[in-house]
Image (cartoon, rainbow, N blue to C red):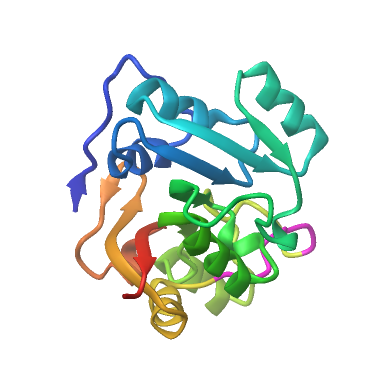
Amino acid sequence: MTKSPGMNSSFKVARPDFALIAAWVKPGSKVLDLGCGDGSLIRFLRDSRGSRGYGVEIDDVNVLACFNNGVNVIQSDLESGLQSFESGSFDYVVLSQTLQAVKNTENIIKEMLRVSKEGIVSFPNFGYWKNRLQVLSGHMPVSEALPYQWFDTPNIHNCTLGDFEEFCGQHGARILERRVMSGNYQITFMPNLLGMLAFYRFEQQK
């Protein structure tokens, strides 16, 4: 278990995964953030990496927040695809803690690889040991990474590290790098058991 390297302390990180994602983004890159919320990640990448980017978001309140944050945003439903963007338009497409909430996972990953050189995803690891204990006790997991009750959760495709890596192998995505975190610590020993959040950088299989 090692402490994750942070970004410059002058940048305030709204979520702990922002710094890790930013470390994978080359300075000056063009980035598309899917399900961008209020645009905090795009703004963070712009300020810390000098990136240029767009967000895709469907919620009216979040779209307005993006405008207020000075973030370029397109209001659209991810499930309908990324037809608004030409192939190879971006250096990176990011899907941060949203993968488990989309219905058509195959199409989302396919579209990410169509419009960008690389994809970056992060998601809560359902195989995390505390989640397993809650399932064994007869309840659906509720945690910092999975904060919803079973009856109001937007998460419909929870998965483990093993599930996602098998999915990539079956759908032409070559994994370039993986980071598994628990809080601020990187997990290298038994990551599918001890890791709370998973981060992957991948490209189209050549």
Magenta span dominant secondary structure:
loop
Q: Residue at x 32, y 64 (%)?
A: 194
Q: Residue at x 19, y 53 (%)?
A: 1
Q: Quadrant of residue 65?
A: top right
Q: Is residue 146 left or right of residue 10?
A: right
- Residue 140 within the magenta-colored segment of the rendering: no
Q: Position of residue 133 (x, y in %)?
A: 48, 71
The foreground one among 190 and 68 is 68
Q: Is residue 20 left or right of residue 86?
A: left
Is residue 120 visible to us here?
Answer: no
Asked if 9 appears above or below 29 in the picture, the reply is above
Q: Residue furthest top?
A: 10
Asked if 8 appears above or below 100 in the picture, the reply is above
Q: Position of residue 138 (x, y in %)?
A: 63, 77
Q: Position of residue 35 (x, y in %)?
A: 63, 46
Q: Quadrant of residue 135?
A: bottom right
Q: Quadrant of residue 166?
A: bottom left
Magenta residues, as a range? Answer: 151-158
Q: Residue furthest bottom?
A: 170
Give the total number of marks visible in the rendering: 0
